Structure formats: C-alpha cells, structure tokens
Image (cartoon, rainbow, N blue to C red):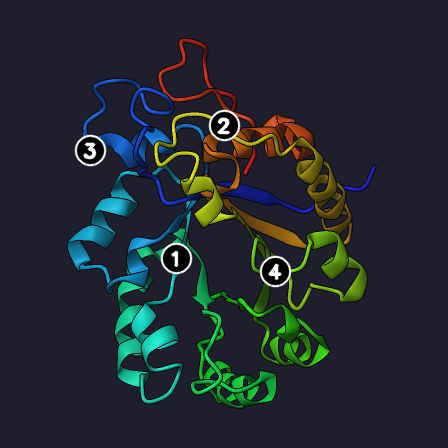
Amino acid sequence: MRRLSPIRLGSCSFTANGWVGSFYPRGTRPADLLATYAEEFDTVELDVTWYRVPTTSMIDAWYKRTPPGFQFAAKVPQTITHDRVLENCDAEMREFLGAMGGLREKLGPLLLQFPFFRREWIPDADAFLAVLGPFLAKLPRDMRFAVEVRNREWVRPPLLDLLREHGVAFSFTDHSFMDEPAQVWKRIDPVTTDFIYMRWLGDRKGMEQITTVWDRERVDRSEDLSLWETICRQLRERGIDIFGYVNNHYGGHSPATIRALLDRLAPELRRDPPGSSRPAQQNLF
C-alpha cells in the first residue's frame, strides 16, 4: 500500500475564550498553554504575528515550550498585506523574516492573508497579480509561503499559475466569503507546490451571533468534513503535504474539529487531550 503524504492539523492560535476548562485543564497557567496545546497537536497557526513582529523573547519562548517536530505557521503582518499591499515594505518583510527565522526547524509556512480589496485600492485580479508577482520573486527560497485571497473571482488559473511559478502554496479556505470547496475543487487544481495550506474559517459574523465563548461545538460540520476528507485523501495520495488550520468560528470549538478531521484522515496521529490519564500516542511525525 502506498504511503500517504504527511498531514499536520492545528488551530488558528493556541488561546481562546472558553478553552480553559474545555480544552485546557482548569488551572492551566497562561505560560503553560502552548506546552499543553503541543501535548495533543503538532502545529499551530500564529495569529499574533498579523498584528506585530514577534520579539526575540517571544520566539525563544515558543521554541522552548514545544517538543521536537512541532511546526509553527504564522501570518505575515498586516502592515505588509493590508496597509502597504506589498509595496514599499521590503524593510518590514526583512524584519519579520529575520524574527521568524529564530524558530529554526520549527518554522512552518508563512501566510500572506489578503483582504477583500476595495476597487479604489486594487481594482481587479490583474492589478493584484501585478503587485503580487514582483513580491513573490523576492521571497527567500529556503522558507515556505502561502497566499490567501478573499475574492472568489480571483481564484482562477492566472493566480494559481503565478503561485506555481514561484513555488508558493495556495491557501484552500473554507470561508463564508468564498465559493464552496467542492466548486473550487472541480474548477481548478489547487496544488501549486509540494504542499497545500488549508484553513477552515467558517462564518465569523454568523457564529458570533450564536456565541463568543469557544468551549464546545455549536454547528454540526459532519457533512462538510466528509467532503474535506475526500479532498484531503486525494491530495495525500498525490504526495502533497497538508498544513491545515481550524478557526473556532468554523464549528464553535476548533480542537473538536481538528480531532474529527484526524479521526477521519489519520487516526494513528491522534494523541490524547491535555490532562488525559491515558499515555499519549507516539507522534509519528
């Protein structure tokens, strides 16, 4: 039987309102959250980097509090992707990459997450690609990058071809702003390099009308996860590595969604929740 390519699944951040007592054991200190998270999951997407470049002390703490084999994905700062839209930001990008390099072998993909641009900023896909192309050409080849767009009309061959040209991954995202994953899957091949970046984001506005406490699942995502199971299996059979990150807004409690995905896709990688009395399974990565 052919060996499937690796899959890493984690959450979009390792802190959330309601996690202590539901995901983290009661009484877990803030300083112990990341280490406790890493007892069960082997990757996380850092949201804090979208707001500012992390300090050396932050980087050192993240590195020391996670075991060998752990991987950090991280968002590129909003100053670069939103405020300056990739232009006149070389110094800021160098500062960010220099800081993230401190994670050494634990550094995973870096995500360029773009907003839905107003027409006065970026009028169309061609204008976006005109600024994206020169920026991607300057990226270091020894780091991994992914690009996420929030305009469904831009997810077309010209964008995917540009990402392939520069060895950058496409962020295949389940988001209320975007087309249904099945439609995207039928229309394009989302693979642009040797890995794919996936994000399960859901409907932030709709979910926050239900709750802002992320202690349990609020939406049944079984049908959606069945579709994603099929997609992920096909990608792994093609030898494509998967980095996937779940937001609380997707189902209400991202750890539960991650566990459900792992149970479907790689049950041998499932480890016991933090605080479990049973011995943890070996991490096969």
**Location of mark 3 (residue):** 30
Circle 2 sits in a helix, a strand or a loop, which is it? loop
**Location of mark 1 (residue):** 74
Q: CA distance from mark 3 to mark 4?
A: 35 Å
Say left or right for 159 vs 216.
right
Query: How packed is label 2: few (under 14 Cα within 10 Å), some, or many (20 or more)?
Result: some
Q: Residue at x 44, y 76 (%)?
A: 140
Residue 217 disc label: 2
Q: Position of residue 44 (x, y in %)?
A: 42, 45
Q: Position of residue 243 (x, y in %)?
A: 55, 50
Q: Residue at x 75, y 65 (%)?
A: 189
**Discs 4, 2 touching: Cβ within 8 Å:** no
- Looking at marks 4 and 1 on the same chain, the residue that comes earlier in the sequence is marked by 1
Q: Residue at x 26, y 17 (%)?
A: 26
- Where residue 238 sits, quadrant-wise, is bottom right
* Residue kind at label 3, given as amino acid type: Pro
Q: Is residue 252 above or below residue 51?
A: above
**Discs 4, 1 touching: Cβ within 8 Å:** no
